[in-house]
Image: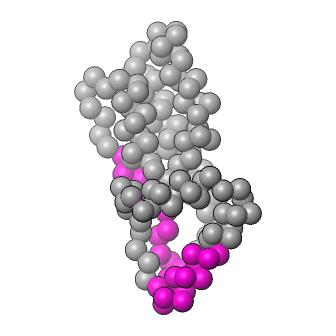
Amino acid sequence: MLTPLTPRSEPAARLLRLFRALPVAERETLLAFAEFLADRAGRLDETAVLEPEPAPEPRPEGESVVAAIKRLSRGYPMLDRAAMLEETSALMSEHVLQGRPAPAVIDDLEALFERYYQQLRASEPVQD
């Protein structure tokens, strides 16, 4: 049975970076090859968790918006931060340029990361 890749695993992070850099067709090829290797090794379990679960860290007192983005990125390593860049930047701009309070912006950032995670989960194929 496959074990989940831990969010802080360097090989997992490296593989995820490489995966995200590939066009869609090559991503499918990489997945097919990984499934082939796991099956050949007798370690393919269709019910195994392939994506790490979020590991959100508690919000420290007086946290800055930049520190919150880093904390959330560590807690949600499976998310494509490039896809979230526009919304994250808009929230950062509201704080820096418009003076919106950090706690309110951080609340929205936490909701943003959770929403993207839920969208990722919804797009995964259902496993029997």
Residue 38 picture location, percent across and down: 52, 82
Q: Can residue 122 be seen from the camera position used here?
A: no
Q: Which residues are magenta?
A: 32-56
In the picture, the quarter occupied by the N terminus is bottom left
Q: Can residue 126 be seen from the camera position used here?
A: yes
Q: Name the colour scheme.
A: one colour
- At 54% from the left and 42% from the top, the residue drawn is 81
Residue 90 picture location, percent across and down: 58, 23
79 magenta-colored: no
Residue 49 picture location, percent across and down: 47, 70
Residue situated furthest right in the rendering: 25
44 magenta-colored: yes
In the picture, the quarter occupied by the C terminus is bottom right
Residue situated furthest top in the rendering: 98
- At 44% from the left and 78% from the top, the residue drawn is 2
> Left of 122 or right of it: where is 14?
left
Residue situated furthest left in the rendering: 61
Which quarter of the picture shows residue 52? bottom left
Which quarter of the picture shows residue 115? top right
- At 47% from the left and 85% from the top, the residue drawn is 43
Which quarter of the picture shows residue 10? bottom left
> Left of 78 or right of it: where is 25?
right
- At 32% from the left and 43% from the top, the residue drawn is 57
Is the magenta region chiefly helix, strand or loop? Answer: loop
Question: Relative to 75, is 5 above or below?
Answer: below
Looking at the image, which is closer to me, 94 or 77?
A: 77
Residue 17 picture location, percent across and down: 53, 53
Tally of numbered tags:
0
Question: Relative to 32, is 111 above or below?
Answer: above
